[in-house]
Amino acid sequence: MAKGVKIVMGFTVTVVAAFWIYQNLPPQFNPFAPLSIDDPPTLVTRYKLRQMADHPQSCLALLEQAAERQQLRFRPVPNVAGICPLTDVVRVQSFGDIALSSSFLASCPLALSATMFVHQRAAPLAQSTFGSKLTRINHLGSYACRNIYNRKDARLSEHATADALDISGFVFANKQQVSVLKGWRADGKGSEYLHRAFDTGCPFFGNSLGPEYNAAHANHFHLGMRGYGLCR
């Protein structure tokens, strides 16, 4: 068989295989399918989420889609100059009917990952654990122009680029509240909820650090975009 014919046949097989993948694989396993806010957090979904940092318009379109579905309330904000500049950031005001202790600044990828985490994991777990709706998420902030642990010789924290959110607790429609500080090592459903929310939420982020990581995280979940799925 001539070399040219082999090349053509090889190319044809590749194209047919790619088309079959595009047509038949579920989107969360299909690298060619566009990201959806409903995609479960597979390795392919995580790869697509990472790509959003380089495609701000596509990321913003997904946030707008979430807003249309009443899963998110946000507004774009002007770029921030200075030592810790920010571009393409938004202010997250709520996750639909799930309130926040205060609004927070977020990079678009963080806002997107957090929205997926809340609606795919945190909210459904509230129903299955307590039989009650999740109504509010308490947090300690997102954007802070500082180094890691405020050390002079450390690199910039993810908070310096609005790429991390520190969640400190959850409030439910039945008036029950659970805090990471008091509930993580306690007994009962509150502790169960926190552990399950943290463990199942990890894949939506580049890194998730909780009370088991070190004393500095005893009172919150650090949910950040750097890395490839660290969960500690």
Image (tube, rainbow, N blue to C red):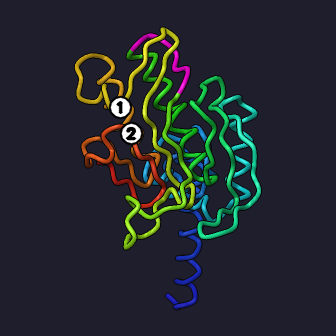
Q: Which residue is mark 1?
A: 180
Which residue is drawn at the image coordinates 46% and 43% (left, top)? 166
Q: Which residue is mark 2?
A: 220
Residue 97 position by quadrant: top right
Residue type at the position of mark 2: His
Which residue is drawn at the image coordinates 57% and 76% (left, top)? 11
Label 2 Cα crowd, 10 Å radius (few <14 / some 14-19 / many 20+) = many
Q: Is residue 146 magenta?
A: no
Image: 60 above or below 95: below
Q: Residue 155, image x and y in percent?
A: 42, 70
Report the side of 138 relative to 190 (left or right): right
Which residue is drawn at the image coordinates 31% and 25% (left, top)? 183
Name the element at disc 2: loop
Residue type at the position of mark 1: Val
Which residue is drawn at the image coordinates 54% and 41% (left, top)? 114
Out of 182 and 89, give the one closest to the viewer: 182
**1 or 2: tag closer to the N-terminus:** 1
Do tag 1 and tag 2 residues touch (Cβ < 8 Å)?
Answer: yes
What distance separates the C-alpha of mark 1 from that of mark 2?
6 Å
Image: 122 above or below 203: above
Which mark is on residue 222?
none
Name the element at disc 1: helix
Image: 48 above or below 28: below
Q: Residue 68, image x and y in percent?
A: 76, 33
Magenta stretch, residue numbers: 130-136
Q: Residue 6, image x and y in percent?
A: 52, 83
